[in-house]
Image (spheres, rainbow, N blue to C red):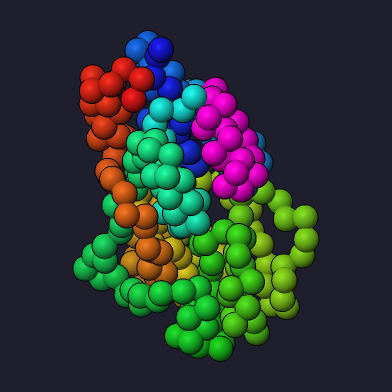
């Protein structure tokens, strides 16, 4: 039987790994997207969209599709998905790997303020500040403490609802963004503070470089705890992990 891999996607690294897997003839792979973004960039693999229906649905899918290994290349802040996937794979004795890109680290000139949770942003950002939320609209309620400040939140898709509190607004934009793009946006809205998650990756670094150029402080939300499981930092290492299992056991 040809080994079958489930790729939990949603990142640029997942897209690169999907392309590498699609080129292989010695294994089969399927990708899964959570469905949080409308019209996501296509993957090179057959792709399912939407949740699995909880733990039972995930287990049923693994069994029905005869999945022999799971590579989790979801967003570094998709903590619940990663924790659940790792736990269930461990219980089922299905090999699990997390493809987690390295964190950003501060560079000379950066003015980072590390916070553990979104709610802490209101503790360090002055009441009169203009704030750019580069975190997306998911769980925006965690920033409710910023109510009263002028808040701009970027999102990929148009919002079906108005901004959840006064003096705030959404602005649409689909990445990637250049440093010039980000600097222009920060100047346009006269932003005083940038709030972002430490997602890592090359494509999102431009906003940090723009903030550095403008001398803006950054509220940097630290990553949540990751599962206790094998982990690699790039698609090539993930493909190597898969290949080693092919040679060890053709059906994983």
The N terminus: image quadrant: top left
The answer, for residue 35, to whether it is visible in the render is: no
The answer, for residue 26, to whether it is visible in the render is: yes
Tell me what residue is drawn at x 34 percent, y 65 percent.
213
Tell me what residue is drawn at x 60 percent, y 65 percent.
139
User: Would residue 38 be found to the left or right of residue 216 on screen?
Assistant: right
Residue 208 or 84: which is nearer the viewer? 84
Relative to residue 67, is residue 139 depicted above or below?
below
- The percent coordinates of residue 126 (x first, y second) are 50, 88
Work out which residue is located at the far right of the displayed protein and give it. Answer: 161
The C terminus: image quadrant: top left
**Residue 63 among those drawn in magenta:** yes
Tell me what residue is drawn at x 72 percent, y 68 percent.
163
Tell me what residue is drawn at x 58 percent, y 73 percent.
142
- The percent coordinates of residue 188 (x first, y second) are 55, 65
- The percent coordinates of residue 73 (x first, y second) are 41, 42
**Residue 231 among those drawn in magenta:** no
How many numbered discs?
A: 0
Magenta highlight range: 46-65
**Quarter where residue 145 is shown:** bottom right
Residue 98 or 22: which is nearer the viewer? 98
Relative to residue 173, is residue 60 depicted above or below?
above
Residue 10 or 39: which is nearer the viewer? 10
- The percent coordinates of residue 158 (x first, y second) are 71, 51
């Amino acid at each position: 039987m040809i080994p079958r891999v489930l790729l939990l996607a949603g990142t640029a690294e997942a897209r690169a790994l999907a392309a590498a897997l699609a080129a292989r003839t010695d294994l089969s792979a399927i990708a899964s997207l959570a469905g949080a973004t409308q019209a996501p960039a296509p993957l090179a693999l057959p792709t399912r969209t939407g949740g699995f229906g909880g733990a039972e649905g995930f287990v049923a899918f693994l069994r029905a599709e005869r999945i022999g290994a799971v590579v989790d290349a979801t967003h570094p802040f998709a903590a619940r998905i990663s924790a659940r996937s790792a736990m269930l794979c461990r219980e089922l004795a299905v090999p699990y790997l997390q493809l987690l890109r390295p964190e950003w680290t501060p560079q000379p000139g950066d003015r980072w303020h590390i916070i553990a949770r979104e709610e802490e942003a209101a503790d360090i950002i002055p009441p009169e500040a203009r704030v750019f939320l580069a975190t997306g609209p998911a769980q925006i309620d965690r920033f409710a403490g910023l109510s009263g400040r002028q808040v701009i939140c970027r999102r990929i898709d148009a919002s079906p609802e108005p901004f959840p509190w006064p003096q705030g607004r959404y602005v649409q934009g689909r990445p990637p963004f250049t440093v010039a793009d980000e600097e222009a946006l920060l100047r346009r809205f006269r932003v005083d503070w940038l709030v972002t998650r430490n997602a890592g990756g090359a494509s999102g670094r431009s906003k940090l470089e723009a903030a550095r150029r403008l001398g803006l402080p950054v509220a940097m939300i630290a990553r949540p705890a990751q599962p206790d499981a094998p982990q690699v930092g790039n698609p090539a290492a993930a493909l190597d992990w898969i290949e080693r299992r092919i040679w060890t056991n053709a059906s994983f």
